[in-house]
Image (cartoon, rainbow, N blue to C red):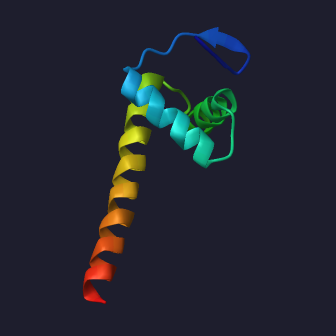
């Protein structure tokens, strides 16, 4: 259960996704609750509604991992070229 915009709500995610969400929040320098609230509010502002917050969180996790993968690949390619 998490609080979003002052309301307790249940967000069901697999444990591995929660680990990644916590990593993203830490990387942003935010407590988990504040990160979730900010993400929810931004999605609400952009789209007018958030119909499936768990799905949004999973997509954020995939984007975060893809970005990290791209950075790691670039480092390897740069080191190989040196």
In the picture, the quarter occupied by the C terminus is bottom left
Q: Residue furthest bottom?
A: 82
Residue under the image location 42 percent in, 48 percent down: 64
Q: Residue at x 70, y 21 (%)?
A: 5
Left or right of 10 on screen, residue 61: left
Residue 18 visible somewhere in the drawing: yes
Q: How many marks?
A: 0
Residue 13, x across and y down, in percent = 41, 20
In x, y percent, where is residue 21?
Answer: 50, 34
- Residue 47 visible in the snapshot: no
Instruction: Indicate the quadrant containing the N terminus: top left, top right, bottom left or bottom right.
Output: top right
In the image: residue 62, left or right of residue 35: left
**Which residue is painted at 37% across and 20% down in the image?**
14
Residue 3: x and y in percent read 66, 17
The residue drawn where x is 59% and y is 31% is: 40
User: Foreground: 19 or 37?
Assistant: 19
Among the 4 quarters of the image, the one containing residue 48: top right
Closest to the observer: 8 or 22?
22
With respect to residue 67, does 60 lie above or below?
above
Q: Is residue 5 above or below residue 80?
A: above
The percent coordinates of residue 32 (x first, y second) are: 63, 30
Name the one closer to the observer, 41 or 77: 77
């Amino acid at each position: 259960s998490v609080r979003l915009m002052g309301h307790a709500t249940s967000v069901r995610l697999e444990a591995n996704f929660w680990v990644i969400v916590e990593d993203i929040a830490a990387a942003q320098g935010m407590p988990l609750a504040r990160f979730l609230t900010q993400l929810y509010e931004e999605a609400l502002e952009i789209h007018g509604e958030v119909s499936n917050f768990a799905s949004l969180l999973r997509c954020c996790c995939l984007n975060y991992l893809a970005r990290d993968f791209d950075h790691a690949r670039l480092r390897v390619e740069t080191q190989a070229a040196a």
